[in-house]
Amino acid sequence: MIFDGFPRTLQQATALDEVLAAKKRKLNVVVELKVDDKKLVDRITGRFTCATCGAGYHDTFKRPKNDGVCDTCGGTKFTRRPDDNAETVTNRLMVYYRETSPLLGYYFCKGTLRSLDGMADIADVSKAIFKVLDETK
Ligand SMILES: [Zn+2]
């Protein structure tokens, strides 16, 4: 069983441990994907999509070949998710540091934490996650 994005608080983590203990189970491994905060904000706030076909672009990393024209469909209207702005992303980071980051110490002390480079290519991150899961079967 894999939990993705849960638990997010110490209270949730201790409650989960109690439920698992009652069933004589435990978490085998907790995987942290470490990211660079500045790069994370840049990645999220730079995203935009073609309003016609939904093709994804980025201000820095994946601009259309011709500015303002979708590579896929030739559309000229683009949209940004309203919550992909710097203020919203920064607020979400604040919530992470306040409520979720204490879990790193909690799971480190329990010996279940594995920290991986979340800034690597998607394929490499996937490979690293599967390796950890294979090692902890
Ligand atoms: Zn398009």
Image: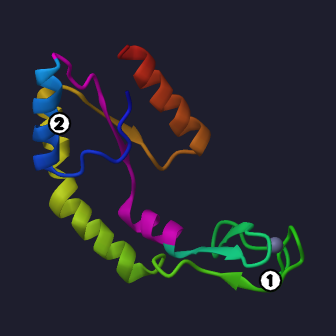
Residue wearing tag 2: 16
Q: Residue at x 24, y 26 (%)?
A: 27
Query: Which quadrant of the frame does ligand 1 lie within?
Result: bottom right
Magenta residues (range): 24-44
Instruction: Report crowding for label 2: few under 14, some 14 to 19, many 20 or more residues within 10 A (C-alpha).
Output: some
**Looking at the picture, how far across and down is residue 121, in whole percent?**
58, 45
Q: Which amino acid type is shown beneath numbered disc 2?
A: Leu
Q: Does the Cβ of the disc 2 residue fall within 8 Å of ligand 1?
A: no
Q: Quadrant of the N terminus?
A: top left
**Looking at the picture, how far across and down is residue 25, in whole percent?**
20, 19
Residue wearing tag 1: 67
Point out the frontmost of discs 2 and 1: 2
Instruction: Report crowding for label 1: few under 14, some 14 to 19, many 20 or more residues within 10 A (C-alpha).
Output: few
Q: Which amino acid type is shown beneath numbered disc 1?
A: Asp
Q: Residue 46's quadrant in the figure?
A: bottom right
Q: Residue 52's quadrant in the figure?
A: bottom right
Horizontally, residue 61 falls left or right of residue 89, namely right
